[in-house]
Amino acid sequence: MKKLIIVLLAFIVFGCTSGKTLLLKEEILETSKNSSKPEWVYKTFKESKGWYEFSGGVTDVSDYALGVSEARAEAVKNGIISIQIKAKSEFSKVAEGSNMAPDMAGKWVTDGISFLAESLYVSGIIQKEIYSEKARYNTEFRPHFNIWVLCKISSEDYLKAKIDAAQRLINKYQQDKNIEVKDKVEELLDSIITEKDI
Protein backbone atom coordinates (compact mmCIF):
# COMPACT_ATOMS: atom_id res chain seq x y z
CA MET A 1 0.00 0.00 0.00
CA LYS A 2 2.83 2.44 0.88
CA LYS A 3 4.51 1.75 -2.45
CA LEU A 4 1.27 2.51 -4.30
CA ILE A 5 0.89 5.86 -2.48
CA ILE A 6 4.52 6.80 -3.22
CA VAL A 7 4.09 5.94 -6.90
CA LEU A 8 0.86 7.98 -7.06
CA LEU A 9 2.48 10.97 -5.34
CA ALA A 10 5.47 10.82 -7.69
CA PHE A 11 3.12 10.67 -10.68
CA ILE A 12 1.17 13.69 -9.42
CA VAL A 13 4.33 15.74 -8.72
CA PHE A 14 5.97 14.96 -12.08
CA GLY A 15 2.66 15.41 -13.88
CA CYS A 16 2.13 18.86 -12.33
CA THR A 17 5.63 20.11 -13.07
CA SER A 18 5.53 19.03 -16.68
CA GLY A 19 2.14 20.77 -17.05
CA LYS A 20 3.63 24.06 -15.86
CA THR A 21 6.29 23.91 -18.53
CA LEU A 22 3.67 23.47 -21.20
CA LEU A 23 1.67 26.47 -19.91
CA LEU A 24 4.48 28.86 -20.80
CA LYS A 25 5.00 27.66 -24.36
CA GLU A 26 4.18 30.25 -27.00
CA GLU A 27 4.04 29.30 -30.65
CA ILE A 28 4.58 32.01 -33.28
CA LEU A 29 2.01 31.39 -36.01
CA GLU A 30 3.10 34.18 -38.39
CA THR A 31 5.11 37.40 -38.46
CA SER A 32 4.82 40.62 -40.41
CA LYS A 33 8.26 39.99 -41.93
CA ASN A 34 9.91 36.89 -43.32
CA SER A 35 12.81 37.21 -40.93
CA SER A 36 13.37 37.29 -37.19
CA LYS A 37 12.64 40.32 -35.04
CA PRO A 38 14.41 43.45 -36.29
CA GLU A 39 17.23 44.80 -34.14
CA TRP A 40 15.28 47.99 -33.30
CA VAL A 41 12.77 45.93 -31.28
CA TYR A 42 15.48 45.52 -28.63
CA LYS A 43 16.62 49.19 -28.59
CA THR A 44 14.14 51.67 -27.17
CA PHE A 45 16.18 54.71 -28.26
CA LYS A 46 18.82 55.33 -30.89
CA GLU A 47 20.43 58.55 -32.05
CA SER A 48 21.64 58.49 -35.64
CA LYS A 49 22.71 61.16 -38.09
CA GLY A 50 19.79 63.54 -38.53
CA TRP A 51 17.28 61.39 -36.61
CA TYR A 52 16.24 60.08 -33.22
CA GLU A 53 14.56 56.66 -33.39
CA PHE A 54 12.56 55.09 -30.58
CA SER A 55 10.54 51.92 -30.25
CA GLY A 56 7.98 50.36 -27.95
CA GLY A 57 5.87 47.27 -27.90
CA VAL A 58 3.01 45.39 -26.35
CA THR A 59 2.44 41.66 -26.04
CA ASP A 60 -0.54 39.38 -25.59
CA VAL A 61 -3.11 41.75 -27.14
CA SER A 62 -6.21 40.35 -28.79
CA ASP A 63 -7.06 43.35 -31.02
CA TYR A 64 -4.40 44.16 -33.64
CA ALA A 65 -5.42 47.79 -34.30
CA LEU A 66 -5.60 48.61 -30.60
CA GLY A 67 -2.24 46.87 -30.11
CA VAL A 68 -0.62 49.05 -32.79
CA SER A 69 -1.96 52.19 -31.05
CA GLU A 70 -0.69 50.98 -27.67
CA ALA A 71 2.74 50.04 -29.10
CA ARG A 72 3.01 53.46 -30.78
CA ALA A 73 2.13 55.20 -27.51
CA GLU A 74 4.79 53.11 -25.75
CA ALA A 75 7.36 54.04 -28.44
CA VAL A 76 6.54 57.76 -28.15
CA LYS A 77 6.76 57.53 -24.34
CA ASN A 78 10.20 55.86 -24.62
CA GLY A 79 11.34 58.54 -27.07
CA ILE A 80 10.08 61.43 -24.95
CA ILE A 81 11.73 60.04 -21.81
CA SER A 82 15.06 59.54 -23.60
CA ILE A 83 14.94 63.00 -25.17
CA GLN A 84 14.00 64.54 -21.80
CA ILE A 85 17.10 62.96 -20.24
CA LYS A 86 19.23 64.38 -23.06
CA ALA A 87 17.58 67.81 -22.74
CA LYS A 88 17.97 67.86 -18.94
CA SER A 89 21.71 67.54 -19.40
CA GLU A 90 21.73 70.32 -22.02
CA PHE A 91 19.50 72.64 -19.97
CA SER A 92 21.45 71.98 -16.75
CA LYS A 93 24.75 72.97 -18.36
CA VAL A 94 23.38 76.49 -18.89
CA ALA A 95 22.37 76.73 -15.21
CA GLU A 96 25.86 75.69 -14.03
CA GLY A 97 28.04 78.48 -12.74
CA SER A 98 25.15 80.87 -12.24
CA ASN A 99 24.30 82.61 -8.99
CA MET A 100 20.81 81.12 -9.08
CA ALA A 101 19.60 79.23 -6.06
CA PRO A 102 19.77 75.47 -6.78
CA ASP A 103 16.01 75.06 -6.32
CA MET A 104 15.32 77.88 -8.84
CA ALA A 105 17.75 76.36 -11.38
CA GLY A 106 16.10 72.98 -10.88
CA LYS A 107 12.65 74.50 -11.36
CA TRP A 108 13.44 76.17 -14.67
CA VAL A 109 15.12 73.01 -15.97
CA THR A 110 12.01 71.03 -14.96
CA ASP A 111 9.72 73.62 -16.58
CA GLY A 112 11.84 73.55 -19.73
CA ILE A 113 11.69 69.76 -19.99
CA SER A 114 7.91 69.86 -19.52
CA PHE A 115 7.54 72.46 -22.28
CA LEU A 116 9.88 70.44 -24.50
CA ALA A 117 7.78 67.29 -24.05
CA GLU A 118 4.63 69.20 -25.03
CA SER A 119 6.38 70.61 -28.11
CA LEU A 120 7.65 67.17 -29.15
CA TYR A 121 4.13 65.72 -29.03
CA VAL A 122 2.90 68.25 -31.58
CA SER A 123 6.00 68.27 -33.78
CA GLY A 124 7.14 65.76 -36.35
CA ILE A 125 7.02 62.34 -34.71
CA ILE A 126 6.71 59.83 -37.56
CA GLN A 127 5.77 56.17 -37.35
CA LYS A 128 8.46 54.41 -39.39
CA GLU A 129 7.86 50.66 -39.07
CA ILE A 130 5.72 47.97 -37.43
CA TYR A 131 6.77 44.45 -36.56
CA SER A 132 4.13 42.04 -35.33
CA GLU A 133 3.72 38.40 -34.43
CA LYS A 134 0.54 36.39 -34.37
CA ALA A 135 1.03 33.83 -31.63
CA ARG A 136 -0.78 31.39 -29.42
CA TYR A 137 -0.04 29.73 -26.11
CA ASN A 138 -0.79 26.06 -26.05
CA THR A 139 -3.52 26.78 -23.49
CA GLU A 140 -5.28 29.33 -25.70
CA PHE A 141 -7.91 28.68 -28.32
CA ARG A 142 -7.60 32.08 -30.01
CA PRO A 143 -4.30 33.65 -31.01
CA HIS A 144 -2.97 36.94 -29.67
CA PHE A 145 -0.58 39.57 -31.09
CA ASN A 146 2.83 40.84 -30.04
CA ILE A 147 3.42 44.24 -31.68
CA TRP A 148 6.36 46.66 -31.81
CA VAL A 149 6.41 50.09 -33.42
CA LEU A 150 9.44 52.14 -34.48
CA CYS A 151 9.01 55.92 -34.56
CA LYS A 152 11.41 58.71 -35.39
CA ILE A 153 11.81 62.46 -35.16
CA SER A 154 14.30 64.51 -37.13
CA SER A 155 17.08 66.40 -35.37
CA GLU A 156 15.63 69.53 -36.97
CA ASP A 157 12.21 68.96 -35.38
CA TYR A 158 13.93 68.27 -32.05
CA LEU A 159 15.77 71.61 -32.33
CA LYS A 160 12.49 73.38 -33.18
CA ALA A 161 10.91 71.82 -30.09
CA LYS A 162 13.83 73.03 -27.94
CA ILE A 163 13.51 76.55 -29.38
CA ASP A 164 9.77 76.52 -28.67
CA ALA A 165 10.36 75.29 -25.11
CA ALA A 166 13.02 77.96 -24.47
CA GLN A 167 10.77 80.70 -25.88
CA ARG A 168 7.91 79.57 -23.64
CA LEU A 169 10.26 79.63 -20.65
CA ILE A 170 11.38 83.16 -21.49
CA ASN A 171 7.73 84.27 -21.69
CA LYS A 172 6.92 82.55 -18.38
CA TYR A 173 9.81 84.12 -16.46
CA GLN A 174 9.24 87.51 -18.13
CA GLN A 175 5.66 87.44 -16.76
CA ASP A 176 6.94 86.27 -13.36
CA LYS A 177 9.44 89.18 -13.44
CA ASN A 178 12.27 86.75 -12.71
CA ILE A 179 14.94 88.48 -14.81
CA GLU A 180 17.87 86.30 -13.65
CA VAL A 181 16.24 83.09 -14.83
CA LYS A 182 14.92 84.77 -18.00
CA ASP A 183 18.48 85.85 -18.85
CA LYS A 184 19.76 82.29 -18.36
CA VAL A 185 17.04 80.89 -20.61
CA GLU A 186 17.93 83.51 -23.24
CA GLU A 187 21.50 82.15 -23.09
CA LEU A 188 20.07 78.68 -23.66
CA LEU A 189 17.99 79.92 -26.60
CA ASP A 190 21.07 81.58 -28.14
CA SER A 191 23.06 78.34 -27.84
CA ILE A 192 20.18 76.34 -29.43
CA ILE A 193 19.92 78.81 -32.33
CA THR A 194 23.70 78.62 -32.81
CA GLU A 195 23.43 74.80 -32.82
CA LYS A 196 20.69 75.08 -35.48
CA ASP A 197 22.82 77.28 -37.71
CA ILE A 198 25.82 74.91 -37.62
Image (tube, grey):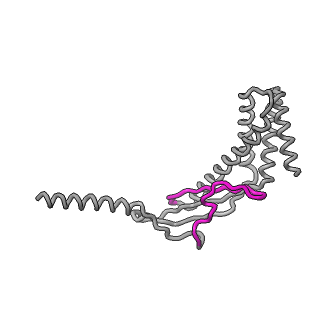
Find residue 157 and report its horizontal and vertical position in percent: 79, 52
At 69% across and 62% down in the image, what residue appears? 128
Q: Give the quadrant of residue 84.
A: top right
Find residue 41 and report its horizontal and vertical position in percent: 61, 60
Does the stretch in magenta take in 187? no
Does the stretch in magenta take in 43? yes
Find residue 98 and report its horizontal and vertical position in percent: 80, 30
Quarter of the figure that contains the N terminus: bottom left
At 18% across and 58% down in the image, what residue appears? 6
Find residue 107 and report its horizontal and vertical position in percent: 72, 32
Question: What residue range appears in magenta?
Answer: 35-62
In the figure, is residue 77 to the left or right of 99?
left
At 74% across and 36% down in the image, what residue appears? 109
In the picture as drawn, the residue positioned furthest to the bottom comes out as 34
Q: Which of 183 and 1 is in front in this view?
A: 1
In the figure, is residue 185 to the left or right of 35?
right
Q: Give the quadrant of residue 9.
A: bottom left
